[in-house]
Amino acid sequence: MATTAIQSTINSAANGVAAQSQTTSTKNTQMDMTAFLRMFTTQLQYQDPTNPLESYELAAQLAQFSTVAELTDIDSNLVKQQSLLTGISNAQMIEDLGKQVTGVGDSLQLKGGSTSSAHYELNASASQATVKIYDDQNQLLRTMEVGQQSAGRYDINWDGLDDSGKAVADGNYHFDVEAVDATGNAVDVTKTISGKVISCRVDNGIGYLVLDNSNGIKLANSAVIEVADPPAS
């Protein structure tokens, strides 16, 4: 068979494998191995007898496919492990029902003139600290200058009023804290929220704890840093 005809046959076989690969991208590695072996044996069958493939070329092709197949298996196993760990983590949320939890977050809920529990921790002393309250549209409602503070944890004490002294509607808000030291450098701030776990919820595969009431703030399970029994009534 002429060399051009051989090459044409090989190219045709390769194109067929490529088309099959595109339509079966969601199938398992065994199907990919079958496609590879079909192309590989076709290549051997129609190779030019005057210029055959060297043994090292054959070995290199086999090694390349073997590596890809192994990496595919590893990726698949990692996805399965991640799914398993997520399921375990979400199942453990049930144990937090009725518990008092604290987690990293900046959410606030205003209800009946009272706000949910929120805090911030200064990693170093601040010559000036400022607490800012925002609505769900990220509009600044209130700026509270709290002055000089030592390193430590502080509560967010918001009375539900905006900067003009007008009471804002019940709803969900968020806060930010800006702090600087005596030289004007920013001080690291950790923002946290806390509350009693009323229910658990999974949205888009992410587990959340609902705090204080059925429509309360959602705290990602992965953000929880402390779990405790609720205070005695």
Image (cartoon, grey):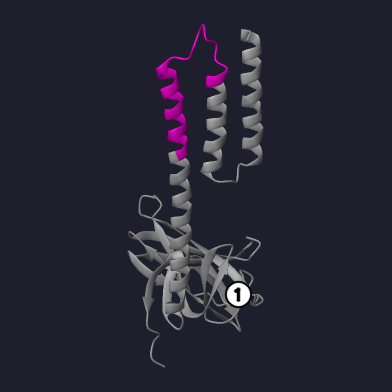
Judge from the rendering whether residue 72 lies leftward or rightward of residue 5; answer left or right.
left
Q: Is residue 54 visible?
A: yes
Location of residue 4 (image quadrant): top right
Which quadrant: the C terminus?
A: bottom left
- 229 relative to 49, above or below: below
For the point 37% across and 62% down, which residue is it? 122
The magenta segment is 44-69
Q: Position of residue 84 (x, y in %)?
A: 45, 62
Number of numbered discs: 1
* Residue 47 location, quadrant: top right
What amino acid type is highlighted by mark number 1?
Leu
Decide which of 120, 8 is in the foreground and name it: 8
Residue under the image location 47 percent in, 15 percent down:
53
Image quadrant in which the N terminus is located: top right
Asked which secondary structure carries label 1, the reply is loop
Q: Badge 1, how many Cα within 10 Å: few under 14, some, many 20+?
A: some
Residue 130 position, x and y percent, is: 48, 62
Dominant secondary structure of the residues highlighted in magenta in the image: helix
Q: Residue at x 66, y 23 (%)?
A: 12
Q: Is residue 210 left or right of residue 16?
A: left
Compared to residue 51, the image places residue 74 above or below, namely below
Give the residue at mark 1: 161
Image location of residue 182, percent across then percent down: 35, 54
| Residue 73 sits inside the magenta stretch | no
Give residue 171's position: percent from left, percent from top: 63, 74
Query: Along the line of sight, which residue is nearer the eye, 160 or 191?
Result: 191
Q: Examine the rendering and report whether any part of residue 146 can be seen.
A: no
Which residue corresponds to the image point at 33% horizontal and 60% vertical from the top-left?
Answer: 125
